[in-house]
Amino acid sequence: MQTSPQYATSLPLTVEAFRNRACARPCYDESYTPPTPDEVKQLRTLLGLSQRQLARFLGANYTQDKGSPTVRKWETALDKASHRQIGHSAWQMMLVAAGVITPTDIIMMLDNCKHS
């Protein structure tokens, strides 16, 4: 009986599984896709950070008592008006912090990305 890999159809449960996601690929890779709100939340959870802590790490807006409206919008479902896509640089910082990619990967990606 053949089964498909779990990471292909569900949220990755480990940092290693994130390496196989389209959202962790370089921007010039044709199979790259931006992370979904669930992927943002899952990677934040794997990092062991609250929304407020992630906002502090990335330099996003937050308050001590209400957390981060910015991170909340990144984690809001795509079909909601309040959803906002996480910026590519912020996403890459999360990937580096988790050990999914390295700073060298980012430099290589920048060298290969086409600029208009």
Image (tube, rainbow, N blue to C red):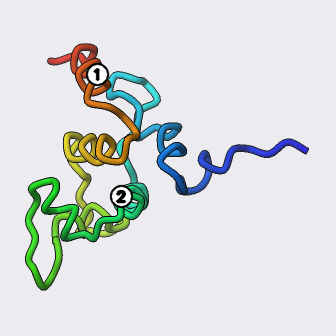
Residue 78 can be seen in this image: no
Which quadrant, please, contains the N terminus?
A: top right
Under mark 1, the amino acid is Met
Decide: is 111 above or below 15: above
Q: For residue 109, which numbered disc appears in the image? A: 1
Give me the residue at 28% from left, 18% from top. Answer: 108
Q: For residue 47, which numbered disc appears in the image? A: 2
Please state the horizontal and vertical placement of residue 67, each as a whole percent of the image. Answer: 17, 76
State the image quarter where residue 75 is shown.
bottom left
Give me the residue at 54% from left, 56% from top. Answer: 13
- Badge nearest the viewer, 1 or 2: 2
Give me the residue at 16% from left, 71% from top. Answer: 69
Task: Mark 1 and mark 2 in contact? Answer it, CB < 8 Å.
Answer: no
User: Quick one: label 1 or label 2, which is nearer the N terminus?
Assistant: 2
Residue 92 can be seen in this image: yes
Please state the horizontal and vertical placement of residue 116, each as a whole percent of the image. Answer: 15, 18
Decide: is 42 above or below 115: below
Under mark 2, the amino acid is Leu
Is residue 29 found left or right of 81 in the rendered image?
right
The one of 85 and 52 positioned closer to us in this rendering = 52
State the image quarter where residue 4 is shown.
top right
For the image, the number of numbered tags is 2
Residue positioned most to the bottom: 65
